[in-house]
Image (cartoon, rainbow, N blue to C red):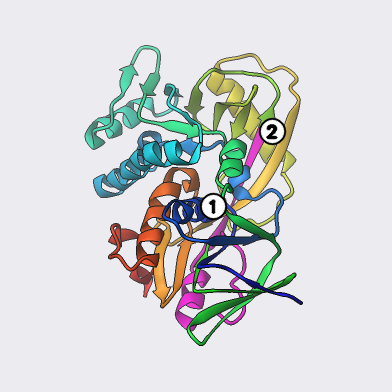
Amino acid sequence: MPLFNSQDILVIGAGVLGLCTAAELVRRGHGVTVVDPGGLNASGVAAGMIAPAMESAVDDLSLDHAELLRRARDAWSDFAAATGVRLDRDLAEWRGGTVEVLAARLAALGFEHGFDRDAGRLTTHEDWKVEPAQALAVLTRGVRTLEARATALSRSNGRWRAETTVGAVEADQVVLATGAGAALGGLPETAARLLDLISPIRGQIGLVNERLTDHVVRGPGAYVAPMGTGCVIGATMEAGERSLRPDPERCAQMLAAAWAVLGQTPRPLQIEWRAGVRGATPDGLPMAGAVEEGLHLALGPRRNGWLLGPLVASVVADEVEGRSPKEPTLAPRRFI
């Protein structure tokens, strides 16, 4: 098989963390090769939420965790302008359920919001979104892509060598952005131990060819968000599940919850159901940064991959360039 030579950096994985990191490195003048088998990945099975406010309220996060998510959201402004990703900053809304509790949490965390107690309606302009298909497409600009599956990694004479299904690739530095996938053969012990901590979470969404709402609407059991000329219904969080086959029963439950959130009478819809598997760390925050000389991780964002993409990319790119980590909370070695 042929031997491919990356100019500087090899990124393994073309989900949101891998492509954001690749795009950030290209912005900084590095030559980057991305190795990925292609096809739909978990980042494409998503609504593209960049939602620090609602995520913080729903998960009852600490102030420090919420502030990290806010910094991640803010990192999108310059990143989107530089890469061509389109940002949607329209209103986000929560209806029903524990809306008073969520409003109190937003207030305690300092997120701008409006609360209509009588209507049971909570709104914020702090949450944004992107269109995953558009974003994934533009993030590959300037990046060399090798459509293959990486199988093993080794280091010799100061360079890394990745074995893939179409040949070997050599690079000075490697970024592992392999989601919830199996660890590559030959990984250093420390990296292998860290990857063993990544647990799978299946998420299911439905793509609808009708525009059921003009802004993100969330509520108990479901959200509905605009996407293209239609919308997306989501999303399940199924810990430990790896199947990519949509579950009709869970999808039916989610659809029923979506109609309730919208306050609309159910009617027949044309829906394409999809399932994707995300990776999660024990503390719910991604691993971003170096684990060995020239080996970096960009893994485990749970359901917040789109929110955290540019922040993780900046952290990894800084460490690739020898700078001190700007977000030590995300350092992979916190688990060792």
Residue 284 visible, this angle: no
Q: Residue 166: image x %, image y %? A: 74, 70
Residue lying at the far bottom of the rendered structure: 157
What residue is drawn where x is 68% and y is 31%? 207
How dense is the environment of label 2, judged by Cα within 10 Å: few (below 14), some, or many (20 and up)? few
Tell me the tag on residue 252: 2
Closest to the observer, 307 or 274: 307
What residue is drawn where x is 46% and y is 65%? 297
- Left or right of residue 26: residue 232: right
How dense is the environment of label 1, judged by Cα within 10 Å: few (below 14), some, or many (20 and up)? many
Using the rendered view, name the quadrant where residue 170 is placed. bottom right
Asked whether 304 falls inside the magenta stretch, the response is: no
Q: Residue 291: image x %, image y %? A: 41, 73
Tell me the tag on residue 269: none
Q: Is residue 206 above or below residue 286?
A: above
Q: Residue 86: image x %, image y %? A: 50, 32
Query: Disc 1 vs disc 2: which is toward the camera?
Result: 1
Q: Is residue 113 above or below residue 192?
A: above
Number of marks in the image?
Answer: 2
Using the rendered view, name the quadrant where residue 267 is placed. top right
Q: Is residue 12 above or below residue 120?
A: below
Asked whether 201 falls inside the magenta stretch, the response is: yes
What residue is drawn where x is 51% and y is 36%? 85
Closest to the observer, 5 or 200: 5
Q: What is the magenta range?
A: 178-206
Circles 1 and 2 in contact, beta carbons < 8 Å: no
Mark 2 element type? helix
Q: Gap between marks 1 and 2, in whole Å?
A: 33 Å
